[in-house]
Image (cartoon, rainbow, N blue to C red):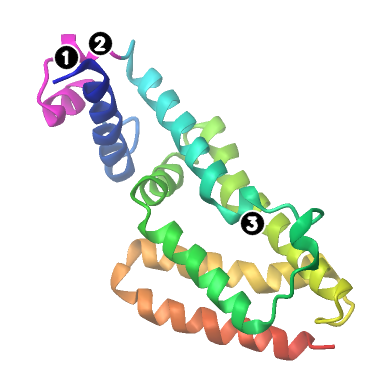
């Protein structure tokens, strides 16, 4: 196997193991065995287990920056004048839920962050950023735009954003634990979004 391919396989296997067992509980031997190489071969690609984690975090951040609406949307730029009626909001948010739940890298990385957030201060900060701060900032920008456009009534935009996005975050966490409830969650999300627009309609 090529060196480059082996390195990528080490990362993929490590993410699989870290997302189930956690970082501390996963050994270099387990990773090497799962890849089908010797520990010595693994060390030719990564200096230690921390180096594997660092590479994974870098890759996850790159994926997140490239694909997550929470990272790529700038409400002050050209999207600012686009209409967003309830139907569009439902479609957009449900699409992001599917991405979060089904993208293999992002879904496993989220589970790793949940496991490690109480043991690793850097991963705790990343968990807060990706699963709270960025989400709330995105929805606050969305709500402010809808208020400016006259779609929603004037009110506390940050509280409105929290009312809109935080139940969805809880439902995503529910799907992480119970994947069979995804359809239920998608239906709840749609009802929730439509009710939000009815309650705050100008």
Label 2, on which residue? 43
At a point 34% along the width and 30% down the height, the residue shown is 24
SS for callout 3: helix
Residue 196 is left or right of residue 167, and the answer is right
Residue 117 position within the rendered picture, expressed as x and y whole percent measured from the top left: 49, 41
Mark toward the start of the polypeptide (1 vs 3): 1
Query: Is residue 181 positioned above or below 50 on the image?
Result: below
Q: Residue at x 39, y 20 (%)?
A: 50
* Front-lying residue, 62 or 195: 62
Q: Is residue 90 above or below residue 98?
A: below
> Circle 2 sits in a helix, a strand or a loop, which is it?
helix
Q: What stretch is highlighted in magenta?
A: 28-45
For the residues marked 3 and 2, what is the alpha-carbon distance in whole angstroms? Answer: 37 Å
Residue appearing at x 71%, y 85% in the figure? 197
Labels 3 and 2: the sequence-earlier one? 2
Q: Contact (CB < 8 A) between labels 1 and 2?
A: yes
Which residue is drawn at the image coordinates 55% and 52% (left, top)? 68
**The magenta stretch spans residue 179:** no
- Judged from the image, the secondary structure of the residue bearing numbered disc 1 is helix
**Residue 6 in which image quadrant:** top left
Number of numbered discs overlaid on the protein picture:
3
Q: Does the magenta stretch include residue 40?
A: yes
Out of 100 and 171, give the one closest to the viewer. Answer: 100
Q: Where does label 1 land, which residue? A: 39
Vertical side of 26 occupied by 118: above or below: below
Give the dominant element type of the magenta stretch: helix, strand or loop. Answer: helix
Position of 147 compared to 119: left or right? right
Name the quadrant of the C terminus. Answer: bottom right
Which residue is denoted by mark 3 in the rendering?
A: 135
- Quarter of image, res 155: bottom right
């Amino acid at each position: 196997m090529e060196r480059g391919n082996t390195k990528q396989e080490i990362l993929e296997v490590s993410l699989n193991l870290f997302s189930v067992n956690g970082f501390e509980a996963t050994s270099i031997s387990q990773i090497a065995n799962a890849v089908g190489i010797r520990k010595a071969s693994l060390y030719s690609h990564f200096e230690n287990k921390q180096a594997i984690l660092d590479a994974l975090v870098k890759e996850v951040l790159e994926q997140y920056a490239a694909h997550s609406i929470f990272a790529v949307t700038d409400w002050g730029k050209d999207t600012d004048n686009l209409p967003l009626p309830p139907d569009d909001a439902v479609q957009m948010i449900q699409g992001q839920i599917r991405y979060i739940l089904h993208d293999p890298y992002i879904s496993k990385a989220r589970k790793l962050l949940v496991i490690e957030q109480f043991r690793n201060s850097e991963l705790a900060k990343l968990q807060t950023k990706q699963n709270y701060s960025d989400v709330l900032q995105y929805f606050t920008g969305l709500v402010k735009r809808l208020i400016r456009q006259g779609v929603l009534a004037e009110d506390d935009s940050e509280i409105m954003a929290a009312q809109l996005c935080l139940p969805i975050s809880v439902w995503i966490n529910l799907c992480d634990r119970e994947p069979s409830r995804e359809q239920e969650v998608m239906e709840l999300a749609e009802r929730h979004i439509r009710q939000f627009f009815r309650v705050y309609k100008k």
